[in-house]
Structure formats: C-alpha cells, structure tokens
Image (cartoon, rainbow, N blue to C red):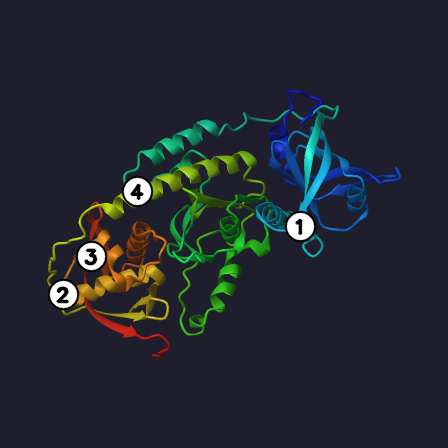
C-alpha cells in the first residue's frame, strides 16, 4: 500500500471510522464527470483495506462500477483532523462477518440520525487503500492523556492464566474487565451444546445477574457476533439489536412458551447507547461471547474492541484447559453419603417437564435445558438413594443426561446451576467438595413430579 505520508497508517486513523461524522466521497464517471456526496459508514477491514456501506444505487455507485477509483475524506470526531484516502474498489459482500458488522453499526447510526427507515445496508463495498494523507488544518488539542490499554490487557491475561477453576476464571475475568479495562457492566455467555443458543453464566455491574438467561444464536448483537465469529461494536442505540425484543420473539416461537414462563430476564441495559460483543473462540471452537454495554454514546473505541478480543481469546483457551482437566479428574466413583431427612415442617414440590428439561420449585421457574436435566438427575438420586455427593465425571458419562456428541461444558453448567440455586434461595444448594466433585445440600422434604412431554397439568 502506497502512502503519501510514510509514517501514517490506516490503523492510526481508526477513530475516524466510527460513523460519528459523515465522510465525503468523490468519484468520477467513465466520461470524466466528477461527483461528490456524503457517505454513512467507513469500516476498517485490515491494514490495507476498508469497506464503504452500499445503501442506494446512486451516482456514486454507478461511477464506481464504471471507474473503480475514489477519494474519501474522513474527520477525526475528537480532534477535528481530516484525512484523505485514495481507494480502489474490489468487490461487494452481501453476507458474512464484514456485512453483519457493518449492518449492526449502521443500524445504530441510522437510529441516532432518525433515519432507520432509510439507512438499510444492501452490501459492503470493499476497497484497497492506495494512499493516505492528512488534509492541511489545525486539529483541536485533546484534553487529558490518551488511554493506553496494552498494559491493562497484559495484566488481564496474566490474571486469567493464574486461575485454577472455572468459577474463579469467570469472576476474575469480569473483575478485570471492570477494574483494568474500565468496562463496568459485562457478562459471559457460553454456547449451548446444540449450538443454537447462548446462556448467561456470569455477569457484573447489572441490577440482576441474569444467570441462566438465553440468547438465540443470530439474535441481537451477541447472537450475530457468535454466528459470524467476529466482534461487533455499536456506538449508538440500535433498537433492532436490543435483547428484550429479540429473546421474547425467539421464545414465543417455541411450543412450550404458550404454557410455561421459562424466560430468565436478560441482565443487559434496556436501552444501551453503546454495545460491544466479541466471540470467545479457542482451538477453532466457538465457545460463547464476552459482552459489555454502556448508557453512554461512543463509549467503546476500536482499542476497547481489540483489548476485549484479546481477553476473550485468552479466556477461551483457559476455559478449555480447565474444563478438560475437570473432566478427566478422578475415576468417576463417588462415595455414597446419605443425608438425614429435613424436618417435616418444610415441603417442596419439584416439577420436571421432559419437553425441555425445565425445573420448577413450588411452581417457581428455576432452570431448563442441560442444567435442568442435571439438577433433576441429582434430585432423583438424592430422593431415591439418599445420595448427596457426586462427581463431574459420572455425570458426563450418564446416558440419562443425553449430552450432545460435541462436549458440552459440564463444568460451566454446574456453575450456572450453583449460582442460579443460590440466587433464588432454593431449598437445594450445590457446594464444591474438591476438584471435579460436589455435594448437594437439601433443606426441605422434596416431592418430585415428572411431567411427560406433551402432558398438561
């Protein structure tokens, strides 16, 4: 890539690509007639390429298809400095990570400008950057020192490397994202074994934890980021990427939703002004997502995105290592310890619906899915055999739990279940007793009721 200023790189001007101030594009028709217009969005692709949003088949589009060169001016929203890029059109993408990332960000820009019905992305036009130069002019001096996230990111991944258990890993990661990266509201979601849903396993900074809440893959910012395996960042509110509506619509498509209320409220802000979701990927496997939001516009920069992506990557590697270690620990045998029955003064009816493995305590919904199946299996063994201690290994090998062929993250499921039970002050609690081992503490006389699929109460 040729640059007029040899010291100026595309990475140096990424702040100009957040869509805060519209840029200007100049093109020329095949007969030499020029055209100048505004554009909505310029997206960083890599150190040598950018993408422009294709929304309308206008004169600019017509010119580019006939003469693939363009010049764009983009201002820095903080300093006011302006940069000119000379571009060469290469192709248009209408699906995939780049398209979805630009679609989400354009939705935020459109809502901010009151143009949601007008700004609809039709494609992402990819350009090679031929030249970069700074337009003459005096920029505004920025107040305060710039944020340097490299040292904070390094500290985050060092702390992650020192974690010895999955629950510690989650808590340390979210604490560092808050304390070191300055993102006070964050959550970790993991991918379900069937690959269709994400479930919240840990959160920080929200009024409620939302542990156990679900997001369908492809719904909202998190679902799209996981489906496309790419970070997505929005600097303004974007209603179509809000989770209350996305999750509600997905839930109502299920047959059981008409009869049972099994949705745990999503912990994110109701109307976030800024959102950032990065996928958690390790060993070529998509494990989940790390998500942050804010009630401030333009809160997350490209540097925040890079830092969170590094943390998510290291988190994913540590998660695989710790869950693999927990899965192979021990021989699967567990001493059978009988727990004395609780006093007769407290009785709790635990109901299990086979249709989706949802579990209710005295008609209050607790959990469903794989975590619900695990809990029901534990309670059955406790009531029938008096057992109170179990191992991760025996659960993983139990055919009654119907784990998917791809290894479902049992360790994370148990943490989710433990936290959900504690949050609801349920009469059953899970306590770790060692590596790969745990016990259940039961504080009521349990009455188990199994409801077969399709049955009504």
How many residues crowd mark 4 within 10 Å: few (<14), some (14–19), many (20+)?
some
How many residues crowd mark 2 within 10 Å: few (<14), some (14–19), many (20+)?
few
Asked whether the beta carbons under mark 1 and mark 3 sit within 8 Å of each other, the answer is no
Looking at the image, is mark 2 or mark 4 earlier in the sequence?
Answer: 4
Q: Nearer the viewer, residue 362 or 192?
A: 192
Q: State which quarter of the image contains the N terminus.
A: top right
List x then y, in percent, for residue 333.
Answer: 15, 53
Question: To which residue does mark 1 refer?
Answer: 110
* Snapshot quadrant of residue 3: top right
In this view, the residue farthest toward the front is 405
Question: To which residue does mark 4 refer?
Answer: 322
Mark 4–mark 1 distance (CA, rounded to whole Å)? 43 Å
Question: To which residue does mark 3 refer?
Answer: 440
Dot 2 falls on a residue whose secondary structure is helix
The residue shown at (29%, 45%) is: 324
Mark 1–mark 2 distance (CA, rounded to whole Å)? 60 Å
Asked whether the beta carbons under mark 2 and mark 3 sit within 8 Å of each other, the answer is no
Mark 4–mark 3 distance (CA, rounded to whole Å)? 22 Å
Looking at the image, is mark 2 or mark 3 earlier in the sequence?
Answer: 2
How many residues crowd mark 1 within 10 Å: few (<14), some (14–19), many (20+)?
many
Dot 4 falls on a residue whose secondary structure is helix
Q: State which quarter of the image contains the C terminus.
A: bottom left
How many numbered circles are shown?
4
Question: To which residue does mark 2 refer?
Answer: 385
List x then y, in percent, for residue 62.
Answer: 80, 46
> In the image, 395: left or right of 161?
left
Circle 4 or circle 3, nearest the eye: 4
The residue shown at (43%, 39%) is: 313
In this view, the residue farthest toward the bottom is 456
Residue 180: assigned label? none
């Amino acid at each position: 890539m040729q640059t007029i200023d040899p010291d100026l790189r595309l990475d140096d001007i990424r702040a100009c690509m957040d869509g805060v101030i519209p840029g200007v594009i100049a093109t020329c028709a095949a007969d030499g007639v020029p055209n100048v217009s505004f554009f909505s969005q310029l997206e960083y692709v890599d150190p040598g390429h950018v993408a422009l949003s294709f929304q309308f088949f206008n004169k600019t589009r017509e010119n580019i298809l006939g003469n693939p060169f363009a010049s764009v001016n983009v201002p820095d929203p903080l300093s006011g400095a302006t940069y000119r890029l000379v571009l060469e059109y290469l192709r248009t993408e209408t699906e995939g990570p780049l398209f979805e990332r630009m679609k989400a960000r354009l939705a935020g820009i459109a809502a901010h400008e009151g143009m949601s019905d007008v700004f609809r992305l039709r494609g992402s036009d990819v350009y090679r950057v031929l030249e970069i130069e700074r337009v003459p002019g005096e920029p505004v001096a920025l107040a305060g020192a710039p944020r340097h996230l490299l040292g904070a990111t390094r500290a985050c991944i060092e702390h992650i490397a020192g974690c010895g258990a999955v629950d510690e890993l989650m808590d340390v990661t979210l604490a560092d994202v808050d304390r070191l990266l300055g993102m006070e509201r964050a959550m970790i979601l993991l991918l379900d074994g069937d690959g269709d849903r994400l479930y919240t396993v840990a959160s920080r900074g929200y009024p409620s934890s939302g542990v156990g809440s679900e997001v369908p893959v492809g719904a909202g910012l998190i679902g799209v980021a996981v489906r496309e395996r790419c970070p997505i960042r929005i600097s303004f509110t974007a209603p179509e990427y809000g989770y209350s509506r996305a999750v509600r619509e997905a839930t109502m498509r299920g047959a059981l939703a008409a009869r049972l209320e099994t949705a745990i409220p999503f912990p994110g802000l109701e109307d976030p002004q800024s959102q950032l979701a990065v996928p958690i990927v390790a060993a070529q496997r998509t494990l989940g997502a790390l998500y942050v939001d804010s009630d401030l516009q333009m809160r997350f920069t490209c540097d925040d995105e890079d830092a969170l992506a590094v943390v998510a990557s290291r988190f994913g590697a540590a998660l695989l290592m710790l869950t693999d270690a927990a899965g192979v620990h021990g021989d699967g045998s567990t001493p059978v310890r009988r727990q004395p029955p609780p006093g007769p003064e407290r009785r709790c009816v635990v109901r299990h619906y086979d249709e989706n493995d949802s579990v209710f305590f005295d008609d209050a919904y607790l959990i469903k899915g794989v975590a619900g199946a695990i809990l029901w299996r534990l309670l059955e063994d406790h009531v029938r055999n008096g057992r109170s201690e179990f191992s991760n290994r025996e659960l993983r090998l139990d055919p009654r739990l119907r784990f998917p062929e791809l290894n479902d993250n049992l360790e994370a499921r148990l943490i989710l279940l433990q936290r959900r039970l504690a949050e609801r002050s349920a009469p059953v609690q899970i306590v770790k007793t060692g590596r790969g081992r745990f016990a259940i503490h039961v504080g009521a006389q349990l009455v188990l009721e199994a409801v077969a699929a399709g049955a009504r109460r």
